Amino acid sequence: MANIEQLRPMDAAPAATFHTLDPSTGAVVATFPVDDAGSVERAVERAQAAAVWWRSLGFAGRVPHLRRYKSEIARRIDELADLVHRENGKPHGDAVLEITLVVDHLAWATGHARKVLGPRRVSAGLLAANSTASVEYQPLGVVGVIGPWNYPVFTPMGSIAYALAAGNAVVFKPSEYTPAIGRWLVDAWARAVPEGRDVLTLVTGFGDTGGALCRSGVDKIAFTGSAATGRKVMAACAEGLVPVLMECGGKDALLVDADADLDAAADAALWCGMSNGGQTCIGTERVYVADAAYDRFVDLLVAKAADLAPGSGDEASWGPPTMPSQIDTIRRHVTDALAAGGRAVVGGESSVRPSGVGPTILVDVPEDASAVREETFGPTLTVTRVRDIEEGLALANDSEFGLGGAVFTGSRRRGVALARRMRSGMTSVNSIMTFAMVPGLPFGGVGESGFGRIHGADGLREFTRAKAVTAQRFALPVNLTSFGRPAKATAVTAKLMGLVHGRNR
Ligand code: NAD
């Protein structure tokens, strides 16, 4: 087990500090400084210097360092999972799964950066046929990563791993609920790459520290959190024309077709909706079930939910809420749904306890209820009967959010066709969240769920700027971009273009 004292930042004495608490016991896990604008600026200045070295290594030079970082995390999965359990509250096994995904993503980003981002020749086209043309994706410099608490390893590392592999330095501001986990990730980098310790550094604090990072001179902000905070981050970044990546909340739907494997669909809906206490951006919150399958599906769901319970031990299905204020939102959504004519077939208002929120399954909830429209972030599901899967898709798409989603159907081909029409960044057919386990696939949303992508080739490019280069191979007898151009040259060029492109086919 890590000695938490070692996780404390060693910088100059801070003006103010804050504690993080174990959600199960209320015990202090660690104490951190509230970094102010000055201290954030100093961190970014150090990162700017480190970014020059990191970039100079090139793809091949960075690979051994990234591999050492990956090994450092992989060898200490249990230690990090223990810290995640204490600071975030999730069961140890779930923490192990989260970290395992990160190791895989780090390996993919390391192995693919050169191929995706390195110089690539493109056709020079007709007008520049005497030149070579190439594009490459160059690092931005310093990326500020602002993270949430619900997946305190997987979520920020989705930006950090890809930003580092693309050749950037990173200054990471973890959630005020999980800074010790952030400290661990940064300390692991310093152990793995001591000569480049400032390539990945930490600042800690609340919203003001995040705001200071937006205004600190970073070259991009990768934000993960609520859409409400995302708007503030965008406003702060707009002051300096700093580009942003927005990974925000979700209200994911799971569609169940009449011919689906209902046992598998019910199992998946429960896990996707309730694991991690429902505190999952790509968690299922709404289920739409075709009429012919509805009664059987609800029976299965209710039966399977019987053994689920929150707690703090290994036997717990999920931990206590990491962020106590979320309890009020969950309670409001359940209360509103019941007042609007919904029924709780599992749990209900009495399940919403600060010590741990029990499972709640709501049926007959009107589509305009807050439990259907807003992100709940609790172990709750609304289950709605629809005429057929087409109606289910239409209701699923009628949401401000559009992050992930799932389709359960007897025909994979039909499932894929439905998935392509779902208004979301990612959809799994006959499974849930699988897209998050595929490092080569992009991750991100539409609408209130944000924009930009982490993971995969798109995730690497997100932390770069495209650079175009041409090199003239030989001079043409007639130079079109010269004041010495003969008068008839443009007429000849226009004629040539008419011959090549003028025919409408
Ligand atoms: P949050 O929006 O409250 O906070 C996110 C981060 O922003 C924290 O580090 C916080 O300190 C910082 N912050 C707060 N105010 C700020 C400001 N004015 N300027 C800059 N930074 C500021 O979100 P949360 O409660 O930590 O996380 C839960 C949310 O994150 C949910 O909506 C969830 O769906 C979303 N989420 C999205 C993804 C995704 O990949 N799309 C992944 C995980 C979580």
Image (cartoon, rainbow, N blue to C red):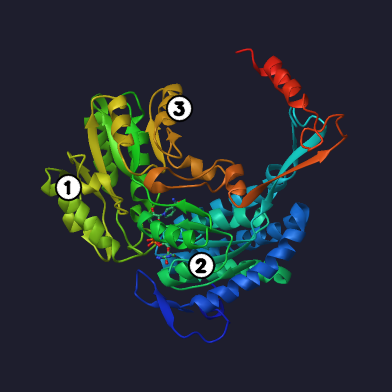
Residue 289 falls left or right of residue 422: left
Which is nearer the eye, 364 or 225?
225
Residue type at mark 1? Ala
What distance separates the C-alpha of mark 2 from that of mark 1? 41 Å
For image coordinates 33% across by 63% down, the residue present is: 320
- Residue 79 visible: no
For image coordinates 39% across by 44% down, the residue present is: 447
**Residue 386 in picture, x, y percent from top left:** 24, 29
**Residue 331 in picture, x, y percent from top left:** 21, 57
Tell me, for residue 277, which label it has, or none: none
Residue type at mark 3? Val
Q: Earlier in the sequence, mark 2 or mark 1?
A: 2
Q: Nearer the viewer, mark 2 or mark 1?
A: 2
Which is nearer the eye, 371 or 430?
371
For image coordinates 34% across by 75% down, the residue present is: 26
Residue type at mark 2? Arg
Residue 125 falls left or right of residue 225: right
SS at circle 1: helix
Residue placed under numbered mark 2 in the picture: 215
Residue placed under numbered mark 3 in the picture: 416
Residue 447, placed above or below residue 57: above
Evaluate if marks 2 and 3 touch, with contact meaning CB atoms under 8 Å apart: no
Position of the C terminus by quadrant: top right
Residue placed under numbered mark 1 in the picture: 337
Q: Residue furthest front?
A: 487
